[in-house]
Amino acid sequence: MSAAFRTASGGRIDRSKQLAFTFDGVRMIGHPGDTLASALTANGVRLLARSFKYHRPRGLVAAGSEEPNALVTVIRDDGRTTPNLAATTVELYDGLVAVSQNRWPSLKWDVGALNDLFSPIFVSGFYYKTFMWPRSFWQKVYEPRIRAAAGFGEAPKAADPDRYANRFAHCDVLVIGVGPAGLAAARAAADAGARVILCDENPELGGSLLADPSAVIDGEPGAAWAASIAADLAARETVTLLTRTTAFGWYQDNMVGLLERVTDHLADPPDHLPRERLWQVRAKRVVIAAGALERPLVFPENDRPGIMLADAARTFLARHGVAAGSRAVVFTATDSAYAAAIEAKAAGVSVALVADLRREASPAAEAARAAGIRVDLATTIEATSGGLSVESVRLARVAANGSIAPGETIACDLVLHSAGFTPTVHLFSQSRGKLRFDADRGVFLPGEPHEDATSAGACNGAETLAACLAAGHAAGAAAARAATGGEVAERAYAAEGLAIEIGGHFGEVPHGRDASRVKCFVDLQHDVTAKDIRLATREGFRSIEHVKRFTTTGMATDQGKASNMNALAVAAATMGLDVPQVGLTTFRRPYTPVSFGAFAGVNRGGLFDPIRRTPSHDAAAARGAPFEDVGLWKRAWWFPRDGEDRHAAVARECRTVRETVGVFDASTLGKIEVVGPDAAEFLNRMYVNPFLKLGVGRCRYGILCRDDGFVYDDGVIGRIAEDRFHVTTTTGGAPRVLMMMEDYLQTEWPELDVWLTSTTEQWAVVAIQGPEAREVIAPLVAGVDLSTAAFPHMSVADCRILGLPGRLFRVSFTGELGYELNVPADYGAALWDALLARAEALGGCAYGTETMHVLRAEKGYIIVGQDTDGTLTPADAGLARAVGKSKPDFVGKAGMARPDLTGPHRKEIVGLLPDDPKCVLDEGAQITAEANPAKGAHALGHVTSAYWSANVGRGIALAMVEGGRSRMGTKLHVPMPTGPIAVTVVDPVFWDKEGKRLDG
Amino acid sequence: MLLITCPYCGPRPEIEFAARGEAHVARAAPDADGEAVAASLYVRSNPRGVIAERWRHVAGCGRFFDALRHTVTDKFVATYRVGEPRPDLAAPAGAGEGTR
């Protein structure tokens, strides 16, 4: 049993095995070696898609990844559907299920095809010009409906069940594209001793050699030669050979991204393999051997199924043993399409004629005539007809003066066309290499490279097989020499094969139709016609970048691989300019679409972002504490007891800390150990506070500014020994503070003998705050006299805690008697449990970050980054007393002395009390002098912190206010949508102004 | 991704480094006037051409170093240790635009 359009023999398929597959539910048979495109063609299926905008019936245009039309969805199971795959790149496997896209109810009867009838009004910019009113309708009504009508496949809804791998690799020479030039380059580089990676997007190596039956290299058929060279390379340890691998993107300094499709071609992918593998290859040298793509002719109604590129038909025939039709018309502007005609005829396809746009008969034309094929010179196609497939074409003769005479109508089911070939310069251009315009051939070729890369073969303008092989060998040898110094002997390949024409015909062909009405498609994937591009130039768009955006030509998933040069030519011709004057659109990554899965790799779910948990995390979770994200940390927010809501829990915790005692996990504080003979001098220069005279065993609240004089971080700094300090930072600030310290140490004061070590993760820290704090910790701490006389507020000591080497601070962020106990991080959970058990026995409780925030605000303690915003000096923050003014220098000393950083206009941190004691202000709310300020009135500042204070019995707030401290006792206003709120400016200390409670 | 040559570790990928702004900008003296302080804090050369920059091999050796980079081509021309003078580039390749 053989499919209708399968040739009797030939092709690189295994005819002994059958693969069953379905397309839109219809079961068909193909063979190993088929793509979905070739198998469908073999079965006579030509209608594969509906077009993006007009829903016109579409079939195959190309045989490779540049295919614009035949996008399908492949379904493996519920979780594995992949939309928008070019059928030409989908390898057939047994049981493959594919469906068409962008049609309803079916591919043959598509309601959306009505759009085609109204196409005269669907010109470029139509949607934006038409659906303008009412304004609010665009987002809610028009855009969703337009998007539903125009479009590609549907994204899968379930999470992707597949695995994606990521690999880094280095090599001397990376060869991109494994046609004749790439094979010769890789062979030369490997022979010279270089480590080589070579990659090709196809499953089989050989590129154009696989599709050219006339190719002979050193006496061997081209495909067989490719196979033997590939086998030789694959056997070498220094060579990595990657098939089904697309070099999709060039990043800087010869970093090239490769996407390897590992299992998509398998009927039953084994579990141990990832679906795709992303390679990040850093190559000393790169040889780009990307080849050339055939360019379509732009003629009226050139989009019907059955109208395809001549080279694609050759590929289907030579590689897959498939004839693309039964009666062909070949339409060409170059010689190479004659080979398609001759090969098709040899395979049993009736070739009605070759219509050649050129006026002179070339040797190829004579050869075709000798083979019995009719050749009409100076002939164009000016119309095609057909329903779901092409049925006939109408010829026209182009006179020497350019006039057009209508000609006969030829029945056919296949039109093969070729305008010439365009070098594939995408990667070269991505690498920031400059393209140069070859005016003789009308193409852009690689010019001055930006990276250590060479283009070789057809992508560099070579047209013959011999030239490609010679260029490949030279490029491979040169790359190896540059990368490793290795040498390889000259090698001359004896090669014959079909030559292609780089260049050819550009833009719309001559025809006698009404150019303002007829559809000559330039970009098939986005339904852009030559008249759309002319309209864009009429509307004033001059740069191709603007024409592209207005018409969307070249902006579909194929990025205009087949269409860009034609679009450029149409635009240039309309404006009467040369192509280089119109410019070339930028080539962007990726060359072909790359799945999000490949980019994400393993970085999804729990591995998407690191999560940092405190030692008390599990204990807090067991008590039902919600967690607050602070940077990467999860911090317990509050610890609800039976039935308590947030408000009740926080109020209870706040009261308990002040009445008895509370336990708080402070492990997230950043910690830096500053050690060395000059440690005190270093801190004295880094922090605004003086540190030289700080005694061993004593602590100081330190403020860190940047050199601009603005507060950057704060924290308690304890002197452990003459040459050792324990510096704490804000929870989020540790990395940047360490970075800043290293910066000054290494670059400003390299003479200082100091070492900095991050110890954030080494210490677990539990804070005990409240009148009973000493009672809680006393039995657990050894080696330190806890009496206030011996160990007053702001003391630090190394001691034993739970029998472990620990570090005890007497510090307070609540205004109560307080300690912070540091133990090695592994014992943090044990310390938490022990302290909490003691505290609860005394009537205390655990408290979370929300309670911590309220308690510190009651005392007017600021949080850097919440109450400051990077524009406040220590004086603005009410901390002028901390600044060591007599120090000769410190970071920020000159900066904070700038004239503009002092004076009555500065914003200062103050307290606010709403007149209504029950009111809790909104953080971030603006503050004004007037209750009902005029629109645009100047705000005096904003609320930075606002809480309900159970201890004070009212709402309290901290705020940044212009000249704030001079406004004590005055009334200001917080305008809100519900009306202005009157507030009084007060001292920011709401609780225990005298600070008596610090000693319990 | 740029390949940056750490003067201590050799060539490493860009993700291991942190850029820290222009190099050879003197920190203002503690008694400098406002104009001088503002200049040292905020005024940068912003050349079209080669710029000297401070970089740190933060995910490697942790050392700060200086580098010459071309702002148009984004190519590193040289890297050198802190305290060493800016290398004299008589005629750097591709630096035709010149510095300010």
Image: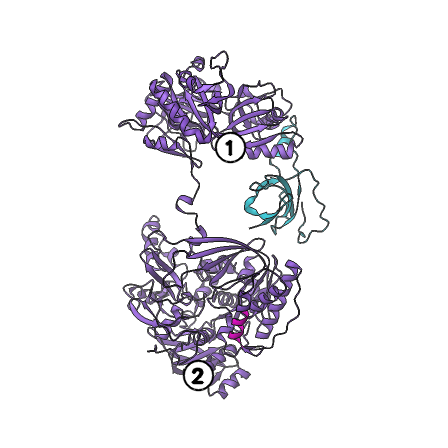
Judge from the rendering whether residue A491 lies leftward or rightward of residue A647; answer left or right.
right
> Magenta includes A501?
no
Task: Identify the residue at horizontal 33%, vertical 53% (top origin).
Answer: A157
Q: In the structure shown, which secondary structural element does the residue marked by tag 2 occupy?
A: helix
> Disc 1 marks which amino acid?
Ala
Residue A488, visible in the rendered structure: yes
Q: Residue A733, how many percent across, how many down?
A: 50, 32
Task: Identify the residue at horizontal 57%, vertical 40% (top origin).
Answer: B58
Camera-side mark, 1 or 2: 1
Of all chains, the one bearing label 2 is A
Between A808 and A634, the one nearer to me in the picture? A808
Q: Residue furthest top?
A: A789
For mark 1, what is the residue? A734
Of all chains, the one bearing label 1 is A
Q: For the magenta stretch, what is the residue range?
A: A221-230
- Colour chosen for chain A: purple
> Disc 2 marks which amino acid?
Lys
